[in-house]
Every structure is written in C-alpha cells, then in structure tokens.
Amino acid sequence: MLCTVCRLNGLRWVKSEALEAVKQVTQLDLRDNHLATLDLSSICSLETLHCQRNQLRALTLSGFTLRTLHASSNRLTTVNIYPVPNQLTQMDLSRNLLEYLPDWVCDSRKVEVLDVAHNFLSELPARLVSLRGLVHPSQTPHFQL
C-alpha cells in the first residue's frame, strides 16, 4: 500500500506529468485544497480517494481498483469513472451540485454506503434499488439520499 497525503497544501491543480510518479498509489488524500478539476484516470491502482472540501467541478477516475470515494463539499456537476468501479463499497458525493446520478452508480454492485444528500437531484434512477448491498437509511446514519 502506498499512501500519499497532500492535504491542506493550497493546491490549485495537479499536472498529469506529476501523476506518472504516483501510478502505484493506492490511497490519496487531497482534502482541503483549491482544486477545480481532477483527472486521476491514469492511476489505475487507486483504492481510496479523499478529495473533500475543494472546489471541484469535474472528477475523473479509474474504476479498476476503486473501493472508497469521499468527494463531499465540492461543486461537482460531473463524476466520470471508467471502467465501472466493481469494487466500490462507499461513496460520499454529498454537498455538491449534481443534478443526476451517473449511470455507472447503478452498475457498481458492491456499493453499501451512498451519500448524495444536499445536491440538486430531482429523481433517482429506478435501477438504484438493484444495488442489493445498499444499506437502508434506518440502518446507518451514513446513508443519505
């Protein structure tokens, strides 16, 4: 496991050339910076990403090994993850500007915790109920729609 912590550094961008050196990172903490966009699609070993409290409008990730995504308190309107993150179990996209859930969310079969509270969602995909592992809000304080 290789963990990189870049929290509270005032970062405004992450250059793609810099990502070449961290391709083996499994845990990445970019919380509390000033990032507006973040493309980590070249980090195929990423399992956990913390990018809360930035100014992110767009987030792009590799889904090969992603297990946990914490991206609350941003300005996200777009979250792209490819391929579908089949290992994803926890995702916090609360307090953003999302108007819809991306299709891949319903295809992520292992999701147990999904927090999309305080967004601009007008409806939820009907397929969301097909996520069998999703814990009902009454069973955990961490689940919010």
Image: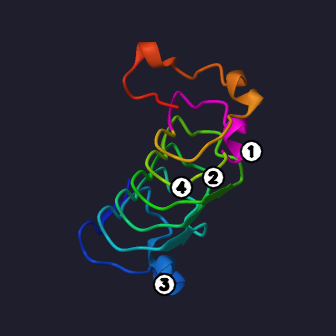
Spatial CA span between label 4 and label 3: 25 Å
Q: Earlier in the sequence, mark 3 or mark 1?
A: 3
Q: Which residue is located at x 48 percent, y 62 percent? A: 75
* Amino acid type shown at disc 2: Gly
Q: Earlier in the sequence, mark 4 or mark 3?
A: 3
| Disc 4: CA contacts within 10 A as few (<14), some (14-19) or many (>=20) | some
Whether pointer 3 and pointer 2 mark residues with C-beta atoms closer than 8 Å, the reply is no
Residue beneath label 4, please?
97
* Amino acid type shown at disc 1: Asp
Q: Which tag is nearer the camera, tag 4 or tag 3?
A: 4
Height in image: 109 above or below 84? Answer: above
Residue 63, disc:
2
Quadrant of the rendered image containing residue 31: bottom left
Whether pointer 4 and pointer 1 mark residues with C-beta atoms closer than 8 Å, the reply is no
In screen coordinates, is 2 left or right of 131? left
* Amino acid type shown at disc 4: Leu
- In front of the other: 44 or 128: 128
Q: Which residue is located at x 61 percent, y 43 percent? A: 121
Q: Which tag is nearer the camera, tag 1 or tag 2?
A: 1
State the image coordinates of residue 20 (x, y, percent, origin top left): 51, 79
- In front of the other: 27 or 7: 7
Residue 15, disc:
3
Q: Secondary structure at mark 2?
A: loop
Height in image: 79 above or below 127? Answer: below
Q: Which residue is located at x 42 percent, y 68 percent? A: 55
Q: Secondary structure at mark 4?
A: loop
Q: Which residues are magenta?
A: 101-115
Q: Which tag is nearer the camera, tag 3 or tag 1?
A: 1
